[in-house]
Amino acid sequence: MRALVALALIGCLTTCGGGGAASSFGSMSQPEITTVSAGSETSAADSSLSTASPESSTSTSTSTSGTSSTGTGTSGGIVWDMGMPDFGPSQPAGCEGKIDFLFAISAGGTMKNDQERLLVSFPGFMAAIQEQFPDFDSHILVANPNSKPGWLMGDCSLCMDDCDPQGQPPICGATLTACDKKIGAGVTYPAGTDASNRRCDLAGGLRYIVSGEQDLAEKFACMAKVGSGGAGRTGEAMVAALQPAMNDPDDEYACNRGFLRDDALLVVTIIQDNYDGDSSGTVGEWIEALRAAKNYDDDAFMVLVLTTDVDIGYGQLCWPNEYVAEQNRLRLLANGVKHGFIDSICQDSFAPFFAEHVSHLVDLCDEFVPPG
C-alpha cells in the first residue's frame, strides 16, 4: 500500500508539472509492505477483502470551449480521474497500533518455572512491538484459568498486604468481588501457592492493563503469577474472556469491560505445560469463539501457544524418551486458525519464540481492516 501511494505521488508530481521536485521526491526510499504467511493450517472459513470492478473507477472524457481534455487514463495500473489518482477500492486502514493482548496461563501444579520464564520474556516482547508503532495502544489481560469457586487461599500465611495471614481459608479475610471468582475474568488478585497473593492495583480500576500504566512489567508480573495451586483450563478461560457480556463497555459490572475492541488486533497467548483435557467445549467451539469475537475476520487475530511437545514424536524437549500419539487440544487450536503458532514450553527461554513472531504481528496490523 505504501509503495502504491509513493508511485502515485511521483506520477502526480510529474504529470501535474512537479518538475525538479518530482525528481527529488522520487529519490526517497519508501518502505514496502511484505506479507508473511503463517506456518500453520488455516481455519475452514477464510475471510477475504472484496474488490470493486474496474468499471466503477472509470469516468468519461470532457471537452470545454473547444479544448479537449482527458479525464481518465492509466499509468502503472493507477486510474487517473480529473488529473488526480483514483486508487479504486479503499486501502487497509491498519490497526494503528491498537492491540488487545489476552493471556491464558495455567495455574497447574508444575507451572511455577514456566510463569517465571514468561515474566522474564514479557518486557522484551512488548518493547519489540512498541518499537514498530509510534502510537502503541495496548490492552493486556490475564484470564482467570480457575472455575468455581475460582479463588482459593489454602494457606493464609501466604497472604501479602491484602488478606490476613492469621485468617481462615479459603478467603483469609480478603475483600473479593464476583469477578475474582469467575473463569475468564481478568486476574487482579492471584491467590494460592506460588501466586502473587495480593491485589494488583491497575490504573482506572479495570481488570486489565492499558497504555500509560506505570511499572508495566511489575503490574503484569503481579497478574501473570497465577500460581501453581489451581486449574489449567486455558482453552475455557480464553473462550470465557472473549464473551460479549464479559466485555460490554456499557456495563459497569462486566468483568472485562471494554477490553475487547473492534478496531484492534487480538493476540491470544496460551501457556500450559500439559494437555488441556479439562476445559469445556471442543477445539472447534474454541475457534468459533475466537472468530466470532473478531467479526469472523481471520486476519484480525493471532494465537501463540507454548505447551508440551510430547505429542510431536520422540526426541522432543519435554520428554525425549516418550511419545503420546494423541495430539494436545492446544496444538489443534494453534493449527486450526489462520495465524496460529506453537512451540515447546520446555525451551530455556520464551524470548526467541515471541521475537520470532513480532514481524508477523506488524504485518497483520498494517493490513488490518476495522469492521464497518
Image: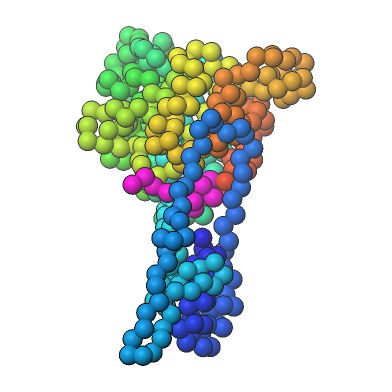
Tell me if residue 213 comes above or below residue 238 in the rendering.
below
Of residues 257 and 282, the one drawn nearer to the viewer in this rendering: 282
Q: Whole-percent x and y of residue 259? A: 34, 37
Query: What coloring was used for the rendering?
Result: rainbow
Among the 4 quarters of the image, the one containing residue 328: top right
Q: Does residue 198 appear anywhere in the picture?
A: no
Q: Is residue 3 left or right of residue 190?
A: right
Indicate yes or no whether the magenta region holds residue 368.
yes
Give the residue at x 38% y 27%.
241
Give the residue at x 51% y 47%.
364
Give the residue at x 54% y 31%.
43
Residue that lies at the very extreme toward the front in this rendered image: 66
Tell me if residue 121 comes above or below residue 369 in the rendering.
above
Tell me if residue 76 comes above or below residue 149 in the rendering.
below
Q: Whole-percent x and y of residue 102? A: 44, 33
Q: Whole-percent x and y of residue 156? A: 38, 13
Q: Whole-percent x and y of residue 361? A: 53, 45
Tell me if residue 354 comes above or below residue 9 in the rendering.
above
Magenta stretch: give its range. Answer: 361-372
Residue that lies at the very extreme toward the bottom in this rendered image: 66
Among the 4 quarters of the image, the one containing residue 23: bottom right
Give the residue at x 41% y 60%.
56
